[in-house]
Image (cartoon, rainbow, N blue to C red):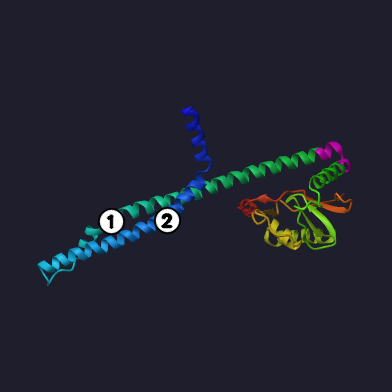
């Protein structure tokens, strides 16, 4: 039982190491400031007492030298210095862990995207273009059926005349095929001019609010943006435009292109 509890405790700490270190950095920063303030008041008191005593013995030479002051108050500043050092170490370690996990996530995402593309190409070869497109449209219809627009939890966003569904962010918005293609062309233009473009640019063109990751993922010259449009029916039997990306936006899209040009 003790061994099991120990294993769970180690796993919990490992999984939450970044959060624990960040919390430690925050607490350490505040505690360092408090200890430094206390040490400063104590140091001033010690220096004042020492100079008062020396004044009583020799009024002509009672001021302490800088070296004497350092020797007198050094011990008072030891705790905040040690705690401050530990706080800095915790912040650095937290940043390293976060960066390492982000890199691992980006690598895993890239592998998944590559595997998805391989599956898509193989299905298209086996089924043929027409059957593959029909199967994709059926999948889009099932997604829309699973999230009925009439539900009170669905929030209609954007502007336009036709109901649209974005499978990537799993939300509805109002727009048109023309606006969607225009947004796609804007992304293509940004890629041609700057070699890269974020998903947020696409959403901005459609007047869709950002998501938590829309600024962190995108496309580049080696990973272009291609939007596929299918027509499905909403739960109230109204036409609905369902969109998806042939090439899913990738993490680290801005660094990926730079690495290839080195």
Q: Main secondary structure of the magenta part?
A: helix
The residue that disc 2 covers is 29
Q: Residue at x 34, y 51 (%)?
A: 82
Which quadrant holds residue 81? bottom left
Counting residues from the start of the chain, the first of labels 1 and 2 encountered is 2
Res 66 seen here: no
Q: Please tell me which residue is depicted at 46% across the width and 51% down the height of the picture.
A: 91
Residue 156 appears in which quarter of the rendering?
A: bottom right
User: What residue occupies the far left of the structure in this picture?
Assistant: 57
Say how many tags the image has.
2
Q: On screen, 117 above or below 175?
A: above
Q: Is residue 108 above or below residue 222?
A: above
Q: Position of residue 80 (x, y in %)?
A: 34, 55
Task: Determine if residue 118 is in view.
Answer: yes
Residue 137 is situated, as x and y percent measured from the top left of the image, at 85, 45
Query: Label 1 neighbourhood size at 10 Å, few (<14), some (14-19), many (20+)?
Result: some
Magenta stretch: includes residue 242 = no
**Would residue 116 be found to the left or right of residue 258 on screen?**
right
- Looking at the image, which is closer to me, 59 or 132? 59
* Residue toward you, 69 or 258: 69
Q: Is residue 223 left or right of residue 236?
A: left
**Image x and y of residue 5, in percent:** 49, 31
Describe residue 111's horizontal placement relative to residue 147 as left or right.
left
Indicate whether residue 127 is drawn in magenta: yes
Please tell me in which quadrant of the rendered image residue 209 appears: bottom right
Image position, residue 195 (x, y; %): 68, 58
The residue where tag 1 is placed is: 76
Q: Is residue 108 left or right of residue 238?
A: left
Q: CA distance from mark 1 to mark 2?
A: 18 Å
In the image, the segment drawn in magenta is: 123-131
Q: Looking at the rendered structure, which numbered label has been put on residue 241?
A: none
């Amino acid at each position: 039982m003790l061994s099991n509890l120990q294993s769970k405790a180690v796993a919990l700490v490992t999984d939450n190491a970044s959060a624990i270190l960040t919390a430690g950095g925050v607490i350490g920063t505040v505690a360092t400031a408090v200890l430094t303030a206390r040490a400063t008041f104590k140091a001033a008191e010690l220096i004042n007492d020492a100079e008062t005593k020396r004044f009583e013995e020799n009024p002509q030479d009672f001021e302490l030298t800088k070296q004497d002051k350092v020797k007198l108050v050094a011990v008072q500043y030891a705790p905040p210095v040690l705690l401050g050092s530990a706080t800095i170490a915790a912040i650095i370690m937290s940043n390293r862990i976060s960066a390492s996990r982000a890199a691992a996530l980006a690598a895993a995402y890239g592998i998944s995207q590559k595997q998805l593309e391989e599956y898509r190409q193989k299905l298209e070869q086996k089924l043929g273009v027409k059957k593959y497109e029909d199967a994709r449209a059926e999948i889009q219809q099932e997604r829309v059926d699973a999230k009925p627009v009439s539900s009170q939890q669905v929030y209609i966003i954007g502007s336009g005349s036709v109901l649209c569904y974005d499978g990537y962010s799993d939300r509805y918005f109002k727009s048109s095929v023309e606006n969607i293609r225009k947004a796609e062309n804007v992304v293509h233009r940004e890629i041609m001019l700057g070699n890269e473009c974020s998903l947020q640019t696409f959403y901005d063109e459609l007047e869709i609010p950002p998501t938590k990751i829309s600024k962190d993922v995108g496309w580049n010259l080696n990973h272009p943006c291609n939007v596929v449009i299918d027509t499905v029916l909403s739960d109230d039997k109204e036409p609905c435009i369902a969109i998806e990306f042939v090439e899913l936006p990738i993490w680290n899209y801005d660094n990926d292109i730079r690495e290839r040009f080195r």
